[in-house]
Image: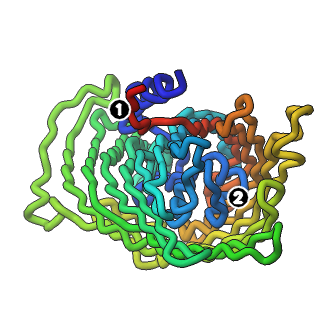
Amino acid sequence: MVKKFVIAVACLTAAGLYAQNGTVSPYSYFGIGDSRSFGTVENQMMGSLGVYGDSIHINLQNPAAYSKLGVKLNNGAGLTNYAAGVSNRQVRLKSFTEEQSSSTTNLDYLALGFSLGKGLGIGFGIAPFSSVGYNLVSESQNTNGANVINVFRGEGGLNRVYFSAGYQLLKDLSIGVTANFNFGTLENERIQSVEDVQFGTRDFRTSRVNGLDFNYALYYTPKITDKHTLYVSGRVNTQANLTARNTRRLGSFFTSVEQEIEAIDVNLDAIGQRNTDLKIPTTTTLGVGFGEDRKWFLGAEYSIQGLSSFSNEFLDVDNLVYEDASTLSFGGFFIPQYNAFNGYFKRVTYRAGLRYDRTGMVVNNTEVNNFGITFGLGLPLGRELSNLNLGFELGRRGTTSADLIEESYLKINLGFSFNDLWFRKRKIN
């Protein structure tokens, strides 16, 4: 029954993942859109830590942790883990003078992982990489004193299909790699109208993007005492070399009815912008944690990305400068008694964390940063190794100064982590 449910989810959502608009943020106007969290609900609720891994949960961020997958049953059969996550994000957008609210609901990941024995684990799946979804209005006056209205709209985003493998190289030491294929379409439109002028102009740009990146990981988990384990990880997500196939269409329209009058396709080959490169800089992450197996864990991570080298020449923005980005995360979990026969909530996993992101975007000479507090529950499903994960994130990004937007958000996550027999050997009695 569980497997039928997961297959149904895959069929219904895999196609929809490509088309979804996963954000309503004005900051998705920049770059390739809002970067999405590439992690399961379990990891996200610990401040998006990737330093912790175990045998029954997939760790999307740390491919070396796949070496730990592989719970064995009494008959020697291994369990396969499959996971899915969805989220709803309630956002309040606030400027210096106005305020409005909106929300989005999205599929966050669909993943499968299992052990091949002898310390080797693999996994694959699909998840969003970035999302574009904005509708901005800017008003100014031209030299004649007439009001000029610019409307900026955007939608689309990038998704990733990934394959991961982790191998226990030595006792307590594992290595891993994830190969990501990123693909999707970014659409951006600018509409301009002038007071008392009958005609307006429209500039519509589309980029079809695809490319690869790799995430390499080293994972060290020695026993410090009989009960306690040290967790140390180092990860390098290499530069994503993306290629964009671009189109641009310019036109005019009647402002009274927004009916198009004339439009032409710009010859981008003549100006060298038909095919452009988008290089998402390398991200390096170091993490450390300490805990007691099936009882508690505390950890911290620090990531840095050389975003100052990023540019998008096809969608150049005048008031934007990129600086190096960084993230600092703290988090952990607590289980009162994982094998309690009485008292369901004694077997519940309680998770919490926080994170601070320097996004690397400097708009109107002002840094755009993000701070979030996370917490959630891992609810066991019966006496099995499967669980339902419920999480919450409260956060704030941006500021109302320098004509910017402050985003206050509540994100509600729902994740499923199932362990079941998939590759069962046939036997004849």
Left or right of 360, for residue 161? left
- Pointer 2 and pointer 1: residues touching (CB < 8 Å)? no
Residue 293 at x, y = what percent? 77, 60
In depth, the one of 343 and 394 nearer the eye is 343
**Does any portion of residue 97 appear in the rendered image?**
no
Residue 404 at x, y = what percent? 61, 56
Left or right of 317, for residue 228? right
Q: The C terminus appears in which quarter of the rendering?
A: top left
Relative height, residue 404 to residue 202 (above, below) = below
In depth, the one of 234 and 371 nearer the eye is 234
Residue 324 at x, y = what percent? 53, 77
**Does any portion of residue 211 appear in the rendered image?**
yes
Relative height, residue 407 to residue 51 (above, below) = above
Left or right of 264, for residue 353? right
Query: In the image as oriented, which residue stretches furthest toward the front?
Result: 429
Residue drawn at x 57%, y 36% as measured from the top left: 86
Residue drawn at x 45%, y 72% as measured from the top left: 216
Q: The residue under label 1 is which amino acid type? A: Ala
Residue drawn at x 25%, y 33% as measured from the top left: 253
Residue 126 at x, y = what percent? 41, 45
Category of crowding for the residue at label 2, using alpha-carbon neighbours closer than 10 angstroms: few (below 14), some (14–19), many (at least 20): many
Left or right of 160, for residue 398? right
Residue 15 - label: 1
**Residue ID for mark 2:** 47
Relative height, residue 132 to residue 364 (above, below) = above
**Which quadrant of the view contains residue 310?**
bottom left
